[in-house]
Each structure stands twice: as C-alpha cells, then as structure tokens.
Amino acid sequence: MKFSINPALFNLKFFLYGFILFIGFYTFKSCSNDEPKPLLNESTFLSDNYKFGYNFNNFNIVYDTIQKGDSFGEILEKNKLVYPKIHYIAEATKEVFDIRQLRIGKPYIMLFSKDGSDQPLVFIYQQNKIEYLVVEFCDTIKAYQQRKPIKIVEKEAFGVIESSLSETMEAQGLPVQLIYEMSDDIYAWTIDFFRLQKGDSFKVIYKQRFVEDSIYAGIERIDAAYFEHKGEPIYAFDFITPESKTSTDYYDLSGKSLQKAFLKSPIKFSRISSRYNLNRRIALYGNRVRPHKGTDFAAPVGTPILATANGTVVESTRRGGNGKYVKIRHNATYSTQYLHMSRRLVNVGDFVKQGDVIGKVGMTGNTSGPHVCYRFWKNGRQVDPFLQKLPDAKALPDKYKTEFLAYIAPLKQRLDSIN
Ligand SMILES: [Zn+2]
C-alpha cells in the first residue's frame, strides 16, 4: 500500500501556526532540488547496491538500531528535523505504520544526500527480515510499507530420534520453526513428544522462505510429513479446502484429521452448574465480583473425571481453594485443570489419553457442593472453553476425497523415497 500526504493540505491551521513560528529558518527539504528525482524512484536494478528500492550508491548511508528510549520523533530530532515536520511525518505515516511501535533492537537506515546535508531524505525501518517501512522526507512526505521479494525453496528432511525430536532436528541444522510446527501443530494430538523412543523417525517435505536469495526467513509451509512412533507410521498431508482456507489442517492417508477435539465435558453424564463468568457475584463474598474462570460440572462424589484430550500430567496435588486437583498439558497452546477432586488417580509425568479417568469428583478445597471445576488454559491464560475455536476432529468431507487422494499420491511417494 502506498500512502502520501501533501503537508500543505494537511491540518491547515497547524501548518500556518508552525509556518509562522518557523518561517525564516525552516523549510522543507526538497528531494527534487537536492537529488534528481529518478534517484529516489529508480525502478531498474542498475546497481548491485540497489536495496529497499533505492540505489545506495547515490546516498550517504547511516545504519543504526533502535535503542532503549528511542522514539521516532527523537531519532528525527537528532537528525535535525524540527517539530512541525516531525508532526507531519507522524500524521503521514500513521495510516501505514504506528511509529510508537518502533521496537528496541530493530535496525533502521537513514539515507542522506551526497551533498553533505545533515537532514535525512529517507528513513527505512526493518520490522523483520521481510517487511520494512519507508518514510521519504521530501517536499511531499511519503510513507509506505514494503515486503522484500521472497524466494520459496522446497526442502526435504529425514531423521532418526536419538533422544528428542528437537535434538535430532537441531543436530541437522533444521530450523526451530520446523520443529515446533511438527510437534506443536501437526502431530500435537497424535504423538506424545515427551515419550519418543530411540529409533522413532521422521520425514518432512516443506517450503522455506528466503529473502535476498540467502537470508532464511521462516517456513512457508509443511506440505507433508511422516512420523514413525513405536513402529507405527503416521502420515500428515496439508490439504486446503475451500472451507478451511488455512494451511493448518493436516490429514492422514485416509483423509482423517490429525487434530483431535476436546471432550465437551470431563464428566460423562452431568450438568453445568456454573459457567465461566468474569463478572460473577457471590452472596457468600458480600455480593462482590468474584470472577469464575472455570466451568463447574455438578456430579455426585466419586464420579469419574475424564481427561478431555491427550496430554501429560504437569500437576497433581492438593492446594488451598483448589483442593485436590490435576493439570494436564495437551500441547504448547492448551492445558486443562480439574479441581475439588476426592481422589487423584494420576501422577506428574503420566501421559493420559482422551477419556482416561484421572480422578474422582469430590468437595475438597473451596466448594459448597460436589462438582468438578474445569479450567481451560490457552497460552497460559484461563479462557472459556465454550468460546474457543478449538481444533476440529472432523474428517475431510467426502466430496473432496477423490481430489485429496490424487493430491497426496505423489507426496506420499516422495516421502517414502526419502532416505
Ligand atoms: Zn468452578
């Protein structure tokens, strides 16, 4: 997107005010006077020093990094740009970029005219390896966000687990993001990565992004993967349907989704007695707001409590108002917690499967009747499970089956031939 503003048209009142104050010693630097326009807008790659849309040979270049306490205004002030202009620049750029969001440690570049002028002509802020913001301070202030051209390279990898997936993948120099996507996205619901066995193996076909030909800029997509755990192979194919529109649905050879939904309730036959409610008022506490960050399922003492999804027990203890409780980590994103148990039936480190009995309903801790308080954690915060867009366990709709099978056949063949 390109956005530009003529400062003379912008906020006329302010402009006049600034103009009166600064008239005589302040004028806008005109790029066209100091630099022939084509230098700023060169469209052909005339030089191998052509970067961010500019021929760097034509400017004095200053490379710097955002320091603690730096603001865009201060950076400009240090570079001899005075207040009214900074204000226009802030206004002109706000449509494309919030200049308050400059992050410490991010690099930026200033282009100065070769005539030795101490006011920069261009400010380039690099948000990440791909995106950057350009602000031109010329007679017209121009701000726009750009992306460097990305080259997508297809890659394959194969490994045998010695101890952990991450160790095996890191030893091969594979990107960390690939490890996370394999363990926390594709196979999070089917393989317990804390319990891999020596000899388990993986294969993966993926696309990697590069900018400027050689700078790694992340994983674009994992097209297909294979994981052999305890001798059992699990294929995963990324397949996009018009309904899914995202690339996060992975299916096995038969078109079954690798993601598993959570059980709706940790108790088989029960009713919800109190929902997640951040504004709950309780008479017992003087009618003050006592947020309820769980969902209560009422059931008689001794009723089995089920793990709502596969995961590893990370807490099993008795503490204060929670009473006896169990907490299960399902993957990097989700954990669930079950309070007020009369008995805990699992220990820290145990791997539990969806539907396994992990304890019995009780009245331990702060509770007025037998129930399980079910707490749902997403990225370390308690949320209402009924409002979450949770992983879908649905199989691929039948109408896509033929297309799916045709799509995965060559991918499977390639996976099988990686060695
Ligand atoms: Zn509760």
Image (tube, helix red, strand yellow):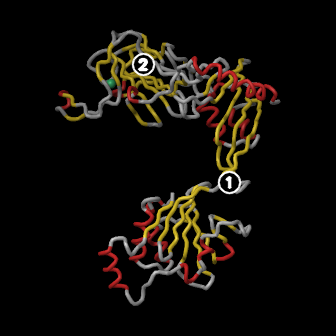
For label 2, the SS is loop
Position of 354 with respect to 91 (left or right) is right
Q: Quadrant of residue 167?
A: top right
Q: Residue type at mark 1: give it.
A: Val
Q: Mark 2 points at which residue?
A: 264
Q: In which quarter of the image is residue 222?
A: top right
Label disc, if present, on residue 97 of the rendered structure: none
Viewer-proximal residue among 11 and 205: 11
The answer to whether the residues at label 1 and label 2 have Cβ atoms under 8 Å apart is no
Position of 348 with respect to 170 (left or right) is left
Q: Does the residue labelled 1 lie within 8 Å of ligand 1?
A: no
Q: Foreground mark, 1 or 2?
A: 1
Q: Residue type at mark 2: give it.
A: Lys
10 Å crowding of disc 2: few (<14), some (14-19), many (20+):
few
The location of residue 127, given as percent across then percent down, is 55, 57
Marks 1 and 2, the one that precedes in the sequence = 1
Position of 2 with respect to 264 (left or right) is right
Ligand 1 occupies quarter = top left
For label 1, the SS is strand
The location of residue 333, given as percent across then percent down, is 51, 34
Viewer-proximal residue among 344 and 110: 110
Viewer-proximal residue among 260 and 222: 222
Q: In which quarter of the image is residue 269?
A: top left
**Image height check: is 359 above or below 322?**
above
The location of residue 342, given as percent across then percent down, is 38, 15
Q: Is mark 2 within 8 Å of ligand 1?
A: no
Q: Mark 1 points at which residue?
A: 211
The residues tagged by marks 1 and 2 sit, at their Cα atoms, a distance apart of 44 Å
Q: Quadrant of the C terminus?
A: top right
Residue at coordinates 50% horizontally, 14% vertically from top-left?
355
State the residue lying farthest toward the bottom: 24
Total numbered labels placed on residues in the image: 2
